Image: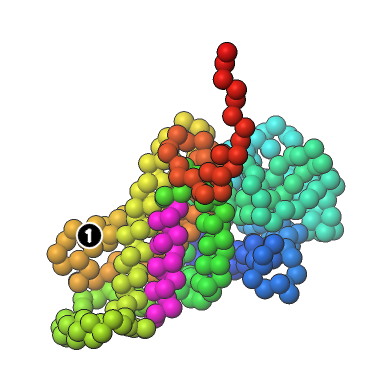
Amino acid sequence: MLTAEAVAEVFETFVFGFMTTDIRREIQLAHRTVAGAIEPDLVPGGGNVLAAIGLLTFTEFLGWVMKRTRAENQHWDDEQTFNEGFRLLGPQYEAILDQKLVKPYHEFRSSLVHSYAVEKTFCVDMPGDAPCGIVKESDGWHFVVERYFADFSAASDQLYSALTARSAVEARARFDNAGVNRDLWYVSSFERLGDLVVDVPPLRDLLDLAIGAAASFMRAEQFGYKDRSFALPDNYYEYLGARARWMANGKLPSHGLWISGYYFNSGLIRLSEARKQLRSLLKKLAKRPGVPQLASDKHLRDEADRLKHEPKGLRERREVTFQTAVSLLEDLVAIIDNEKSALRQLSVGAPRTSSERRNQALKPKAPPHG
């Protein structure tokens, strides 16, 4: 039987490690090779079928963890182990099993793994706006990698927290510190945020804050930001005074801890407010089943409040690491992206773009009633 410590090691090594990195990289590649790609020589798409195979086997891995942590689950065979992991992904996945629409273990997972083919008409989409990672369309079954990955990640976080009593956000942040390329994340996130500005008009002001937070974090990293868990040194304010006098010449530092911390602080405040607004909007959707919730972000809110309201600010120490902040931003983007169909229906006054105003002006007006 796996102990809580063993579960934590398994998740932080495998799930938050190579599983997440491999699938995220393929999704990023798919986003970067659509129309207007940054590198036009890249082959369009990503490893769609390979990503589907990975996610289906990773789903069985979640069931394996459940099997190895509870004595009453030891009798599960391979199919039930997969199905229990599949159920963790959400109510839509449970419905596929309960309504016997298809046997995903045999017809998708085993067919792809063992013969690189499926018994049903089957299409693998990389990006996609779907209510579930596996959906039945008029032309057959579709596996939507980006949606399935989002649901798999949420289920992984919940199972990790339930079995270890630890924060999944902080665990993922610790892994990212070990070497995930953050620049690639920025490319994908800015593209997704740009699409959401068009797709979800009621959230445009909130997205403005989120884009500002992403830009601030990117700039902080470029200027050499380093996490700090200790108090500012005694000579900090001496150098601060000299720095301010130097900036009187109309120049800002081009690198260093002060300017990078300035941008990081800006990002923290923007992100905290954006998450506060989204949390309020999600409450309006609470009656709908399966509405996701934002990950815990108490440290972020506390740090932003100290910056805004306490005279000593963050002089003594910081509690939010760079990677925790980026993970919380990614959490916000993922939830808006997954719930955009519902969020765009909210009755929130939405600013319109100039093209939307022009299109509205060109619409023929109804004749007056006589």
Q: Is residue 153 visible?
A: no
Q: What's the residue at 80%, 48% (across, down)?
A: 122
- Magenta residues span 207-224
Write down the quadrant of residue 341 in the picture: top right
- Kind of residue at disc 1: Lys
Magenta span: helix, strand or loop, mainly?
helix
Whether residue 217 appears in magenta in the rendering, the answer is yes
Whether residue 238 appears in magenta in the rendering, the answer is no
Left or right: 189, with 214 as reference point:
right
Q: Point out the image quarter for the C terminus.
A: top right
Q: How many marks?
A: 1
Q: Indicate the secondary structure of the residue bearing disc 1.
A: helix
Image height of 330 relative to 287, above or below: below
Q: Give neighbour class at mark 1: few <14, some 14-19, many 20+ (Cα, 10 Å).
A: few
Identify residue for label 1.
Answer: 308
Position in image of residue 38 (x %, y %)? 64, 71
Position in image of residue 133 (x %, y %)? 66, 47
